[in-house]
Image (spheres, rainbow, N blue to C red):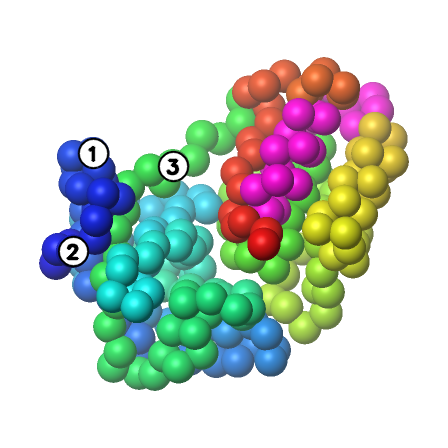
Amino acid sequence: MGQGRGWEGAVLKLLRAKDFMLTVLDAEDVTPHYRRLRMSDGGLLAATGVHPTMWVRLWFSDDGRPHQRAYTLVDPDPAAGTFGLEFALHEGRASDWARGARAGDTIEATVQGTGFRHPDPEPSHLAVIGDPASLPAINSLLGALGSVPATVWFEGDAAGLPHRAEEGRHEIRPVPRRDAGAHLVERVRAELPAVLAGTPDPYVWIACDTATTRTLAAYARKELSVPKHRVHALGYWRAD
């Protein structure tokens, strides 16, 4: 396992990454553009443990070249050795694999780089900015922070998707994707200051396309003066 992955695989090996073989147990189309797979973990959870927003790198073949993408674990069950993976379907090798995945199919996974540090002090309000690609991580984050109230700017249509926002505690604000993310940036800039006003210990969590994530993280830190350690920003995908 782990052969022929090019320089990415070599670097991960040097960083003591752990490799596992996952097996598809079943598949479900949540919507025409969102697919959930339940996986047998190949010993992964017993070997690594579990933490909120935990993710793994899946390895795909792209015309014979190694291609890896990261996915958040959904409802990991160490006792059963299972977890879910959810795919926002679009053009691309990972989505193509997910569309065709059936029970018994296998795929290699690497664990390296994932982690979670509980915000200290606990947030008085959580501001989340994401989209279908980061929805599993958003759900995990909301669960990990328990009773913390949250405002979620969700780029895309949340209808029918398995979000776990709790009414009365978590507010979802849908934002259509327009102008390569510029509309989301405009909405957040217009609304985030009022949401954070009077909040002594905010926490801002951003996971959109890479360019939008970078822009919004800089805005939160530089213009709203949210301390760097209170802003988590990770680009989940690259827009064409």
Please determine whether, in this image, residue 70 is positioned above or below residue 27: above
Q: Which residue is mark 2?
A: 4
Please determine whether, in this image, residue 69 is positioned above or below residue 122: below
Q: Image point 21% across, 53% down: which residue?
A: 5
Q: Do labels 3 and 1 touch, CB within 8 Å?
A: no
Whole-number angstrom distance, CA of label 1 to CA of label 2: 17 Å
> Which amino acid type is marked by label 1?
Leu
Name the mark nearer the viewer: 3 or 1: 1
N-term mark: 2 or 3 = 2
Q: Quadrant of the C terminus?
A: bottom right
Magenta span contains residue 201: yes
Magenta span contains residue 117: no
> Which amino acid type is marked by label 2?
Gly
User: Residue 175 location in percent, x, y?
Assistant: 79, 54
Q: Which residue is mark 1?
A: 15
Whole-number angstrom distance, CA of label 2 to CA of label 3: 26 Å
Quadrant of the rendered structure where residue 85 is?
A: bottom left
Per the image, label 3 sits on a secondary structure element best described as loop
Q: Which mark is residue 115?
A: 3
Q: Image point 70% across, 26% down: which residue?
A: 220
User: Which residues lie in the magenta part?
Assistant: 195-220
Crowding at mark 2 (Cα within 10 Å: few <14, some 14-19, many 20+): few
User: Residue 94 location in percent, x, y?
Assistant: 41, 66
Along the line of sight, which residue is nearer the eye, 28 or 211? Answer: 211
